[in-house]
Image (tube, rainbow, N blue to C red):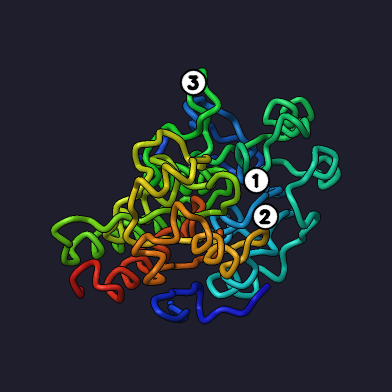
Amino acid sequence: MKTRNKYGVLAAAAVLGLSGCGGATKAAPAAGGTVTVTNCGTKVDFPAPAKKLFVNDSNLISMVLALGAEKQVGAVSSIGRDELVLTEHYGAAVAGLNQVSDDYPGLETVIAAKPDVMVAGWNYGYDETKQLTPDALAERGIAAYILTESCRQEGSSARGIVDPWTALRDDMTNLGEITGRTEAAAAVVADFDQRLAALDEAPKADERPVLFVFDSGDKAVFTSGAFGAPQAVIEAGGGHNAMADLKDTWTEVSWERLAASKPDAFVFVDYPGQSFEQKVAVLRANPATRNLPAVREGRFLNLPYAMWTSGPLNIDAAEEVRTALEKWGLVPKG
C-alpha cells in the first residue's frame, strides 16, 4: 500500500497531501441469548452478544472496531487496501485481526472460520454467484447481517432504502445490539452527529459546488448515486453529488453523463485496480472530460475506500471534502 500524508491526496496545480433513525431494536439480553434487530426492513434474530464475527470489507470492519469489539471478531477478509487508515484510527486492534482472505471470501472460507455471525453486504461480500448469501448462511446456522447501504430495493437489483446517514446510524445501533456494546454504539453516533452539526454551521456557497465521485473509469464510469455513502459525505462537506438523481448506491454511468454534469471537482476512491495517477490520466485523455475546468485545474481529492463506503469514517471524509472545497475557493472559509 502506498504511503499517504494522513488519508488522501488533494491536487490543484500539483498533488498535495491533506491531513487530515436507527432501525427498531430490542435491548441486548444476557450472555447466551438472542437479540432481534430490523435489518433491510426485516426483523432478524442474532446470537447476542456475538462471540465470533466474520466481517468482510474494511468499512464494515471499521464499524466493529469503532465499537471496541475486536475481541469478538474471529475472522476478517478484504482489509489490506485500508490497513493504513484503519490503523491510524483504531491502532493495534487492526494488527490483531485474523485475515483469512485478501479478497471477498467464498462460502467455504466463511464456513471454515465457524462464525456465529457474518457481517457483509450485497456487493460487499454477499454474492449469489459464490453461493454466499444470508439464506445460505442461515441454512448452516450462521446469522447474517446485511450492510444497510446495500439493502436491495423491492423488486429491483438497485441498492439503498434509506438516506446514507440513517443507514449508518442503523448499522452502528444494530451492531451495538449484536455485540452487546450499545453504549459504544450510541457514542459513535453522537460523535458523528455532533461533527455533522458543526459542518452544517459552516459558511455556505451561494450555489453548492458539484462533485463527481470517480470510483474508476474505462469504457464507462463507476460512480455513486443518492443512496451511496458519498452522497452523505459530499452534502455534509458543502457540495452537491453530481449523480444525486440516481436512486442507487454504486453504479455505472456513461462518459457523456459525466461530462454533462459539469463537475467543479472530482473525488476519487483510492484502492487497487486504478491508481490516482491512472484516474487523472484517464480524465485528461478522454475527449468528454479533458477540457472540463475541474480537470484542467486539477481539482481532485483522493481518499481511501473505507472513507467513501458506508462506515464511521464517513464523517472524516466529509471534513476532508470541506477542507478541499475551501482550499479550491469553492466554498467560503469556515
Label 3 is placed on what type of residue? Glu
Question: Residue shown at 61%/57% (left/top)?
Answer: 58
In this view, the residue in front, 244 or 196, is: 244
Q: Do the residues labelled 1 and 2 touch (CB within 8 Å)?
A: yes
Whole-percent x, y for residue 185 in the image: 45, 53
Which mark identifies residue 154? Answer: 3
In this view, the residue in front, 40 or 73, is: 40
Closer to the camera: disc 3 or disc 1? 3
Q: In this view, does 101 lie above or below 118?
A: below
Closer to the camera: disc 2 or disc 3? 3
Residue bearing the label numbered 1: 50
Q: In this view, does 167 lie above or below 2?
A: above
In this view, the residue in front, 190 or 303, is: 303
The residues tagged by marks 1 and 2 sit, at their Cα atoms, a distance apart of 7 Å
**Crowdedness near tag 1: few (<14), some (14–19) or many (≥20) residues, C-alpha within 10 Å:** many
Which mark identifies residue 72? Answer: 2
Label 2 is placed on what type of residue? Gln
The residues tagged by marks 3 and 1 sit, at their Cα atoms, a distance apart of 29 Å
Left or right, 234 with reference to 185: left
Of marks 2 and 3, which one's residue comes earlier in the chain? 2
Left or right, 294 with reference to 70: left
In this view, the residue in front, 112 or 205, is: 205
